[in-house]
Image (cartoon, rainbow, N blue to C red):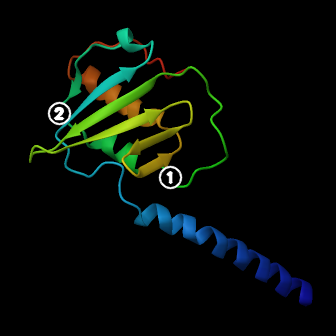
Amino acid sequence: MRRRWFVVGAVALLAAASLPFILRDELVAPVVPDGAVQAQLTVDGPFERSWPLNSVIDKDVTPVVSELNSLSSTKRGDGCFAAMRPGYRMRFEYPDGSNQTVVFDLNCGSVRRGDVARYGDVTKALDAFARIYRAQGGTVPDPPWAW
């Protein structure tokens, strides 16, 4: 009987320990607020010439915003293990004239906007941008991030 209560107690303790991370993802500020009407992608580093200088989407920015905001606010693991991957900046514009810039770090699997940071498969947001850009008639090479 004691063993069973021990197991139940251990499971409850593990569940309680993970709860702050689950709640934290729900309570943190979004990477990008909803309502963006345009996004522009720029590439940092030696990959600059692989994308057109003016990569802008202005039809439906919502899938990109959703991918960014679905990333975890909890960093998993330590360090950055991918080397020599390009960096990206995506600038979101809003109807009121304001803008927000998100910096992508593919080496560490993170995105940042000011003090807001998220972690995970950040390439999903870049893939969403590329799909929308191509649907708008833009021509871009195969994504350099799909290695």
Q: Please report the residue visible at 74 percent of the width from the left and 75 percent of the height from the top.
A: 11
Q: Is residue 96 left or right of residue 131?
A: left
Q: Quadrant of residue 139?
A: top left
Residue extending farthest left: 96
Q: Please report the residue visible at 65 percent of the width from the left and 31 percent of the height from the top.
A: 81
- Report the disc number at residue 88: none
Tell me the crowding category of disc 1: few under 14, some 14 to 19, or many 20 or more residues within 10 angstroms, Cα based: many
Q: What percent of the width, then of the height, locates residue 4?
A: 86, 84
Are the residues tagged 2 and 1 within 8 Å (C-beta)? no
Work out whether residue 114 or residue 15 is closer to the camera in this orientation and state it: 114
- Amino acid carrying label 1: it is Ser
* Quadrant for the N terminus in the image: bottom right
Work out whether residue 138 or residue 108 is closer to the camera in this orientation and state it: 108
- Amino acid carrying label 2: it is Lys
Q: What percent of the width, then of the height, locates residue 32?
A: 31, 48
Vertical placement of residue 58 versus 114, above or below: above
Q: What percent of the width, then of the height, locates residue 44?
A: 40, 21
Q: Quadrant of residue 89?
A: top left
Q: Is residue 5 left or right of residue 135?
A: right
- Report the disc number at residue 59: 2
In the structure shown, which secondary structural element does the residue marked by tag 1 occupy? Answer: loop
- The mark lying in front, picked from 2 and 1, is 1
Q: Which residue is mark 1?
A: 72
